[in-house]
Amino acid sequence: MASAQVINAALGMGFWAIAALILPPAQLGVMTALLALVTAPAMVIGTGVGDVFNSMMPAAGPELPSVYRRGLRVFYLLSVPAGIIAAGAAVVFISEVRFSIPVAAMVFAGVVVWGLFVLQNSTLTSLDEARRQPLVNGAVSLGRIAVLLLLVWLANWQPIVMATVLVGGVAVVAMRVFIGRIVSERTASARQGTWTAEAAATEVVRMCKQAVPTQAMGIGVILLMPFLVTAYAGPVQGAVFSLSMSIAQTLEFVGSAMGTSLVVHASKNPREGSKMALVLFVRVSVLVAVGGILLSLAAPVIFGILNPEYLDLNAELVVVLLALGSLLRTMFVVWSALQRARREIGPLVVINGLFAAVVMAILPFACHLWGAVGAALTVGIAQAAASIAAVFGVARRRDSIRKRVFQYEV
């Protein structure tokens, strides 16, 4: 899974590098804001329902189809209104595309299509088919690059978002057939599961009610940042932040992928969850620290090749701050994965709410003062706050366990 995310992130950096080479910063900033309105709700809903799949499918047994169907139903019930809201926000708050019906339709389709693609990636993991993710994600990322170049050559109309929607749509159709076949095969050979069909459907809805808001206040806020930075500081600063985030997100993807792996394995072996989490924390911390140093050193070279104008806008400092924020977030990533494996999502809602509140409170002022640099600093502060809260969560749980053990011995 980590390999799949590294490949995806590397090709994603290539996608944005090509976009930065062929598009001026102001035009690129508008498209990154539109893409943020697509990917933020898509990732929130797709990852939220996907987290439920990760924690339930490994233990679903014969009721695997019930979990899968109910999860898809919840996804559509959430993604359609989210797409409508995102489309409206795009043509109201971004002056360059104000009241454009084609742009609104494109954003709506993007939310649903890309959300399905994200959900299908999580479904592959839940079905123990994560080994296929490098191929799938690599093909989609390469396809986006090819379609981007083709669209720029044919008609330079929102090529970044259009490439994402078109390639994502093709991948969704192909993966839907494959996943349906795997679900049927696993159901036929499954032994007794944890839930009945009715209980499984009820549990999916219950967990989605917690998982989706949790993702909205966490990854949703981060992915919406290019739109917010563009709104607060202008399209040029939005482009600086988006390009820097596309570089630094490699670190986020690695941690999130390995965290998802912990969810799946700890769901099967709950007694070993804490030991798995400790090992994972060490590995993720080392990978993110080393990767952050390498990306920080490479950032001036990368931006110098793409467009020296970005160096004058302190893009390399934005990368450094985002990389530091990713390292500070490591504790929270591992803790949240363990909480999802235990299906104890309530504390995640609280801490992600803290993260979102810190970002929304500081971001307008930070963007006004320092632009994209201020946005990166805001993200780092909020990520540090989330990890500190996660440490207190671990300590509180240990105290609770000690008290129960003491009462039992007495």
Image (spheres, rainbow, N blue to C red):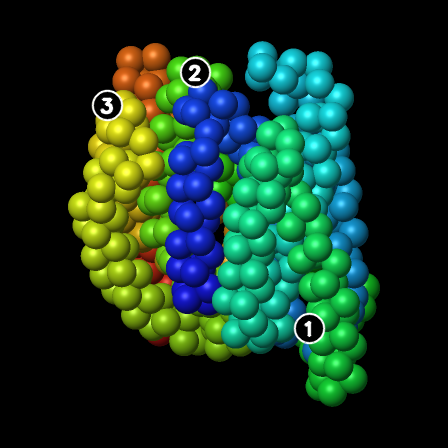
Q: In this view, does 283 lie to the left or right of 194?
A: left
Q: State yes or no: discs 1 and 2 in contact (Cβ < 8 Å).
A: no
Between label 2 and label 3, give the one nearer the viewer.
3
**Which residue is at the front of the view, 144 or 292?**
144
Disc 1: which residue: 60
**Which structural element holds mark 3?**
helix
Q: Residue at x 44, y 76 (%)?
A: 271
Question: Disc 1 on helix, strand or loop?
Answer: loop
- Residue 87: x percent and y percent? 69, 26
Task: Kindly identify the residue that appears in the image at 26 percent across and 29 percent down.
Answer: 308
Q: Name the residue under label 2.
A: 234
Residue 77 can be seen in this image:
yes
Residue type at tag 1: Ala
Task: Estimate how packed mark 1 is, as few (under 14), some (14 to 19) or many (20 or more) residues with alpha carbons within 10 Å.
Answer: many
Please name the amino acid that badge 3 sits on: Asp
Q: Mark 3 points at which residue?
A: 312
Q: Against 142, is 386 above or below? A: above
Q: Residue at position x 40%, y 15% from top?
A: 233
Say which of 386 and 18 sits in front: 18
Q: Where is residue 310 in the image (x, y as percent from the top left)?
A: 30, 28
Mark 3: few/some/many CA within 10 Å (<14, 14-19, 20+): few
Left or right placement of residue 66 versus residue 48 in this view: right
Helix, strand or loop status at disc 2: loop
Where, by quadrant of the figure, is residue 91 drawn?
top right
